[in-house]
Image (cartoon, grey):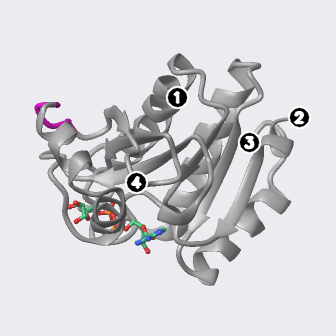
Amino acid sequence: MTNDLVHVVQADLTTLNVDAIVNAANPSLLGGGGVDGAIHRRAGPELLAECRTLGGCITGEAKITAGYRLQAKYVIHTVGPVWRDGQHDETDLLASCYRNCLNLARERHIQSIAFPCISTGIYGFPKSLAARIALSSVKAFLRGHDEGMQVYFCCFSETDADIYRHLLQHSSEDM
Ligand code: AR6
């Protein structure tokens, strides 16, 4: 029952008490605005110092660091696609962000992970489409692995949370 492992919360991602939070970063991995800025502010300068050792990250991939002053033990940094017109692999790249984050989490035996709505802020990805990709990528992963990882979709706004809640309520197990 993958639906039992998927949760929607409306919160500031940086406050969540989960094993790992996901950062919607940029290819430099050296911080920025949005949720990236909030994570670096709360985690402290040690996070930036570790990020400097990683050599950046390409779109669709993910890298992991410690969480430092965050409650979360780990931060998984991924780089979502910038939305252009939907004809530049945006959907596949967004799906691979979710998949690669979950694979890294699995390698580290992470039991709970919280995602922001990757690419839907500064990067301009349409919110409903992004939520559908997020949910279907996560469910496909959970169906293929039986560790029972708890996955949280952390929405900054109630409007975003409603999109996810609606999709979850109306999606079948095999979405
Ligand atoms: N907690 C949860 N969600 C948040 C928070 C927070 N504290 N702050 C923002 N969001 P964005 P992107 C939501 O722009 O579109 C950075 O400069 C926000 O409402 O943070 O992937 C990076 O360095 C939206 O729903 O990320 C990149 O350059 C979601 O997080 C670029 O932005 C993602 O919005 C990445 O753009």
Tell me residue 31's x, y (percent).
19, 57
Tell me residue 44's x, y (percent).
28, 57
Numbered mark located on residue 127 in the image = none
Q: CA distance from mark 2 to mark 4?
A: 34 Å
In this picture, which residue range is highlighted in magenta? Answer: 54-58
Q: Earlier in the sequence, mark 1 or mark 2?
A: 2
Regarding mark 1 in the picture, which secondary structure is present there? helix
Q: Earlier in the sequence, mark 2 or mark 4?
A: 2
Q: CA distance from mark 3 to mark 2?
A: 12 Å
Q: CA distance from mark 3 to mark 1?
A: 22 Å
Q: Nearer the viewer, mark 2 or mark 4?
A: 4
Q: CA distance from mark 1 to mark 2?
A: 20 Å
The answer to whether the residue labelled 3 contacts the one labelled 1, judged by CB atoms less than 8 Å apart, is no
Which residue appears at 19% of the width and 49% of the height? Answer: 48
For disc 3, does the CB lie below 8 Å from ligand 1?
A: no
Numbered mark located on residue 175 in the image = 3
